[in-house]
Image: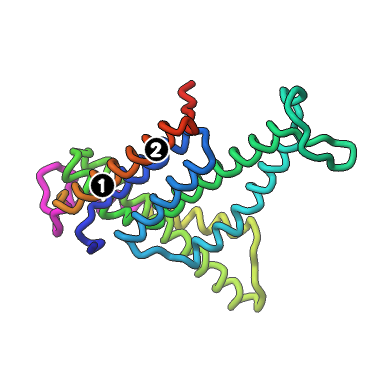
Amino acid sequence: MNSKKINDVSIFFIALLYILPALFAENSVFLLLVCALAFINLNLVRNLNYKFLGIFLLVLAIPLISVFISVLINSKLTANSQVLFQIGSRLIYDTSWHNAVFLTVRTFVLSFISVSYLLGIDYDDFVYSLMRNLKLPVSIGFALLATFNAFSFMRQEFQRIRLAYKMRFQKKKLSLLLIFPVLVSAGRYAYYAGLSMESRGLQAERTYLRKHKFTFWDTVLILSNLVLLAILVYIFWEKGSLQLRLK
């Protein structure tokens, strides 16, 4: 499937489609299958930065281990359950083990789906599509575009300031004092961005280089994912292994 045929709003909707059951379902296997389906669909429509995604998974391992250990050693409301094993003087109960596994899996699934889809969305096309198709006010849309572009500008400006400091003092500098010139650059960027948007006009009757319309492939992607997710929910529901937490 050609990624250029898929609207970024559709990709954002697919992300929400898989995040919602991950928020309410209480079955670890179901959550992992949802995560796999979400990742496969994203790979079909976007080329991901696997290097950055791998770094994210390595960083994510630290909070995942913390969540697992914290829930595992918490023995509240588990005294009546079966003891699985003992670590030193601490008893590990069956309920604690299952809660630790489940909460760790849920944290991983929610984090992985969110970050992977954030990497797959083109933010400029996403905002343009919201303005063209979902009637997002132009003033809000271009403010979002300026905000997204500001992150890249601030990173480049910070690198230039550090390079200038190194050229002048012959050493690298990483200090809070660098925040002040960066803030000055941010103020200048905000002024020129506002001036540019005002001079170009923020009225709704404006022309666009691309149409950013929903296509046949968007409908196919959304409907196929709805069907796959419905089948997955039905299978686990019929087996009695899927519980939903609606409170």
Nearest to the observer: residue 229 or residue 188: 229
Q: How is the image coloured?
A: rainbow
Give the residue furthest to the front: 239
Nearest to the observer: residue 145 or residue 4: 4
| Amino acid identity at mark 2 | Ile
Q: Earlier in the sequence, mark 1 or mark 2?
A: 1
Is 197 covered by the magenta stretch?
yes
User: What is the crowding at mark 2: few (fewer than 14 residues within 10 Å), some, or many (at least 20)?
Assistant: some
Who's the residue at 56% across and 57% down the image? 57
Q: Is residue 53 left or right of residue 2?
A: right
Range of magenta residues: 190-212
Tell me the residue that label 2 is attached to: 235
Q: Secondary structure at mark 1?
A: helix
Is 193 covered by the magenta stretch?
yes
| Amino acid identity at mark 1 | Ser
* Picture coordinates of residue 134, whole percent (x, y): 20, 39
Tell me the residue that label 1 is attached to: 224
User: What is the crowding at mark 1: few (fewer than 14 residues within 10 Å), some, or many (at least 20)?
Assistant: few
Q: Is residue 10 visible?
A: yes
Nearest to the observer: residue 71 or residue 237: 237
Who's the residue at 64% across and 56% down the image? 176
**Distance from label 1 to label 2 (Cα)?**
17 Å
Q: Is residue 25 left or right of residue 134?
A: right
Image quarter where the N terminus lies is bottom left
The tag on residue 60 is none
Q: Is residue 165 left or right of residue 48?
A: right
Give the residue furthest to the right: 89
